[in-house]
Amino acid sequence: MPKKTFLNLPKPKQQQFLKVAFEEFALHEYHQASITRIVNKLGIAKGSIYQYFENKRDVYFYLLEVAGRMRAKAGEANGNQTPNDFFQFLAENFIKKIHFDLEHPSISGFLFNVMQEKNSDELGNIQLKTKMQTMDFVRQLMDRFKSSARIRKDVDEEMISYYIVQMQWGFYDYLELKYSFNFREKIKENSPIFDISDDEIEQVVMRFIQLLREGIKRN
């Protein structure tokens, strides 16, 4: 977590630090990411960063907290309204998160890298931990909709929540294959990760959701 000296910085300086740090961890996996490159881009002395954070790991986990909070807010499909359909909720949630990723390529790239990290001495199995947190959110949604008889009651919640999380991340692999984009090059250019229309995005998402719907919706 950041020290008080970081939290006391003016907001523009905090935002500039986050921008540069997200770019560094989006372009490099954890062990290749460099605090030196971050401070050089910011034009500050290397020792200054340790007035803000304990170490690189501390920076990383703060970025994860900020990114997770921002992306979760972006994925709120219906604001304060209670959704009436589980599958429509998922579709809107996916679409809004994709729009967030298009607007924030470095944050999206950072989170993509998080999902590639496994069994690091410094990070632990961050991929598994992140998936489990997301699965908990999906299970809560499923409980809400199962009680209103919109999802089969015999569904294994853990298996389906895992499948949905995998489907969400696999969606980006599919787009990468289908549209032949280079994730890191787009981040370097600070340009949208893939250049496709909203209609195309929605069509692909709905095809994914339809496959899920056919499997677990109650007849």
Image: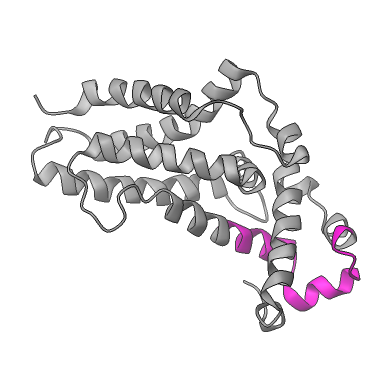
Residue 208 part of the magenta-drawn span: no
By secondary structure, the bulk of the magenta-drawn segment is best described as helix
Q: Position of residue 118 (x, y in %)?
A: 60, 42
Q: Is residue 212 left or right of residue 201?
A: left
Q: Position of residue 155 (x, y in %)?
A: 18, 33
Of residue 193 and residue 2, the one placed in the foreground of this image is 193
Of residue 109 and residue 124, the one placed in the foreground of this image is 109
User: Based on the displayed image, in which of its 4 quarters is residue 21 positioned?
Assistant: bottom right
Q: Position of residue 61 (x, y in %)?
A: 61, 61
Of residue 30 and residue 97, the one placed in the foreground of this image is 97
Most distant residue in the top direction: 178
- Residue 104 versus residue 165 in the image, above or below: below
Q: How many numbered dots are placed on residues in this image?
A: 0
Q: Is residue 107 visible?
A: yes
Q: Position of residue 209 (x, y in %)?
A: 32, 27
Q: Is residue 54 visible?
A: no
Residue at the spot 76% in from the left edge and 50% down from the top edge: 24
Q: Is residue 194 left or right of residue 167?
A: right
- Residue 147 versus residue 219 in the image, above or below: below
Magenta span of residues: 41-64
Q: Is residue 193 left or right of residue 35?
A: left
Residue at the spot 23% in from the left edge and 22% down from the top edge: 215
